[in-house]
Image (cartoon, rainbow, N blue to C red):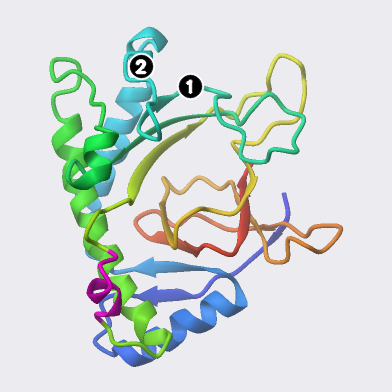
Amino acid sequence: MGTALKLPIIDLSSPEKLSTSRLIRQACLDHGFFYLTNHGVSEELMEGVLIESKKLFSLPLDEKMVMARHGFRGYSPLYDEKLESSSTSIGDSKEMFTFGSSEGVLGQLYPNKWPLEELLPLWRPTMECYYKNVMDVGKKLFGLVALALNLEENYFEQVGAFNDQAAVVRLLRYSGESNSSGEETCGASAHSDFGMITLLATDGVAGLQVCRDKDKEPKVWEDVAGIKGDFCCQHRRPYGKMD
């Protein structure tokens, strides 16, 4: 593991929008990451998402493969993805399930794949509720990002950034296992996220590492603790991995 990195904590409920936007700007410049607290997604809902996720990943592989990923939505098995293309490993040691909005062009081109209701009756309503709640968090956060860039708070809404929602939720299960060849593997190998903002929710288990200067050699990896109930936010520039 690397050295520990202490990240700033941003209170999304603060009425002081301008000062909060300045804190976000500084956090992005200094770290590329920050914690988001008092974001409005209930602890009950976040716990429900974790419970339903565990139920899905506990299904037999053949039942999960019925929902195999098409495009970028659906189920991906262990080692299916390798985020660091130069890595010699067979793939990242994680399972993944991705879903997004059912509306708009992307929702029609890449429809969501859901587990059968008789298998997991609470799964779809829980996840759709979570998606809506997290999108609300994202829109509020984007307003603060706009202010941090000296733009109008509703700038991203005005330019149509939310019209055809490309945002997705990715549920991840990291196996923590070594592959049969004995090679070192990561849950998610070194990468920079696509999109503008990532909101990472965890069960509190450590594993995230970040590299604040990916061009520096040797790379310096720093541990980032997971705070259960808060989001760890990342903008596009930083470089990270999950051990």
- Local secondary structure at mark 2: helix
In the image, 102: left or right of 38?
left
**Number of the label disc, if any, that sits on residue 77:** 1
User: The residue under label 2 is which amino acid type?
Assistant: Lys
Q: Let me know if residue 178 is in the magenta part.
A: no
Would residue 91 be visible to someone looking at this image? yes
Position of the C terminus, as image quadrant, is top right
What is the count of numbered marks? 2
Residue 185, percent across and down?
69, 31
Would residue 41 be visible to someone looking at this image? no
Above or below 60: residue 160: below
Residue 45, percent across and down?
21, 47
User: The residue under label 1 is which amino acid type?
Assistant: Pro
Badge 2 density bin: few <14, some 14–19, many ≥20, Cα 10 Å:
many
- Local secondary structure at mark 1: loop
Residue ID at (52%, 62%)? 236
Q: Which residue is mark 2?
A: 64
Q: Let me know if residue 159 is in the magenta part.
A: yes
Which stretch is magenta?
154-161
| Residue 170 or residue 158, whichever sits in front | 158
Mark pair 1, 2: CA separation: 8 Å
* Residue 16 quadrant: bottom left
- Sequence-wise, the earlier of marks 1 and 2 is 2
Residue ID at (24%, 32%)? 111
Residue 89, percent across and down?
72, 28
In the image, 94: left or right of 243?
left
Residue 214, percent across and down?
73, 60
* Residue 52 quadrant: top left
In the image, 212: left or right of 16?
right
Badge 1 density bin: few <14, some 14–19, many ≥20, Cα 10 Å:
some
**In the rendered structure, are the residues bearing label 1 and label 2 in contact, judged by CB atoms less than 8 Å apart?**
yes
